[in-house]
Image (cartoon, grey):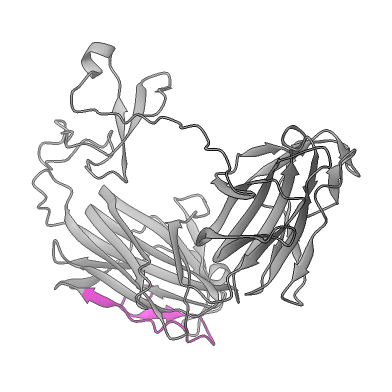
Amino acid sequence: MTNRFEDNHTRAGILRGGTFFLPYNTSRPVYNQNSIWYFPNRATLDTHGKLLLMDDGYDRAATVGFRCVQQLPIPPCAARACIRLNPPAAVANLTAAGAIDWRHFGGPPASKRAGSGGISSIRIVGTTTAAVDYDNNPTGFVWSDGAGTARQSVPSTTGTSLASPGGSFLIRLQLPPDATTATAILYVGTWFTAGILTLSSAADGTNLTDMTVQGAGYRTVAYEIRFSVPWLDVLWSQHPQRLSFLQAELGMVQNNMRFGMADLTAEGTADWIHWGSNGRVTATRKAGANILDGKFKILGSGQVKVRKDSVIGFQWSDASQGGNMTSSTYTGLSLMGGAGTGFELVIPASTGISRCRVYLGVWSGYLRLSAHLDDNSGHEFVDDHIGSFWARNLAYDFTFSSATNGTRLIIRWELLRGYSVDGVDPHAEPLLQAVTLQRLAPTGHISLQAATLS
């Protein structure tokens, strides 16, 4: 359970795992509706529910459980070099962590003013591709004893990245003459690739490799490296092979005078499709693009119809037919047929990084949304917590890449049940409005942000 939230009217907490409790709205008995003041009930561990708090006696319940976690001491390093993977802090103080030395990479050069020289500058090996600086790193870095930039009180989010399969960052860690052991922290990251950390030292034949940092989207970690050899080469490498990745998240929709507006021309730089704008169950598409085929598959059996009451409006200026849509259209499709009915879209995938945004929704019911790559990579996204007692329109962003060309991204959403208490609602319908596609990059990249030595 989270900390308690309070406003002028209520107190509440957020419970992970949902609840079997089904709040009932007695003010709408005709529609047999659940209460709209609570999240829809779910009893799965990957969802959260809102718990309105009354008083300690009333809120106490045997059905609310908690798990306790004990932090174990860090085991001693028996070898000449050891690796430990840590989650990075939101803000890292390089001065505090780097008593012997520190370096910050990306942007203007920064290092410890009176450092021992225990951390070398970067070398790039295994590729002729140049590193590129960036400024949106999830971890920010501060310091107060820098050379060049003496003090950085506002967290710096710069880093340097390398987009080349098989390419590596190389730095050397040097043990101070008067020390027998030292601890380094290396801040690194990946974006739609896997990172491989290798420690080696010809001084005693030390050689360690770790490949635990991989995943869709941007991921950062802090490697803790303890060593007692005179020097240690640290190689942070991009995996030489193409890998399959899939990331899904709710997308933001620009607000306007109504509920939201989507510019399909701006979003769909590679391709886009909109359904229902001409009052028929047909597609309007981007001129000169044919990546998306404009087709959808009906799941179950039902009747597709055009709706004109989407809470998201759509505009475009590069349609292949029908002219531009400069004043928003709020049209889309719905499927009448009850539980088990829904839509399926097939999006071509490649070894490059692509982003597909799907505008979908539900009317008076609950949806199950799923997405997977059909290359048997095992990457799958599922969200069965999409529900509304009225109309709900969403934009889901799927960012993906495939190990091979010719792979397809399969996106399905189907109606689980109506919103009423008994789950039967003749007005429950899954919705489809539009899809856009962008090509983001030909490959993923690794990143290096900072290193400390103490």
Residue toward you, 288 or 68: 68
Left-right relation of 337 to 201 = left
* Residue drawn at (58%, 70%) of the image: 239
Residue toward you, 101 or 439: 101
- 247 part of magenta stretch: no
Left-right relation of 177 to 416 = right
Magenta span: 277-298
Report whether residue 105 is seen: no
- How many marks do you count on the picture? 0
List x then y, in percent, for residue 344: 29, 73
Q: Is residue 378 above or below residue 56?
A: below
> Which quarter shows the C terminus?
top right
Q: Is residue 126 above or below residue 113?
A: below
Residue toward you, 324 or 388: 388
- 282 part of magenta stretch: yes
> Which quarter shows the N terminus?
top left
Report whether residue 326 is seen: yes
Q: Classify residue 379 by image quadrant.
A: bottom left
List x then y, in percent, for residue 78: 57, 44
Q: Is residue 257 above or below residue 403?
A: above
Q: Classify residue 39 by image quadrant.
A: top left
List x then y, in percent, for residue 229: 72, 50
* Residue drawn at (38%, 31%) of the image: 69
List x then y, in percent, for residue 185: 67, 45
Q: Residue furthest front?
A: 204
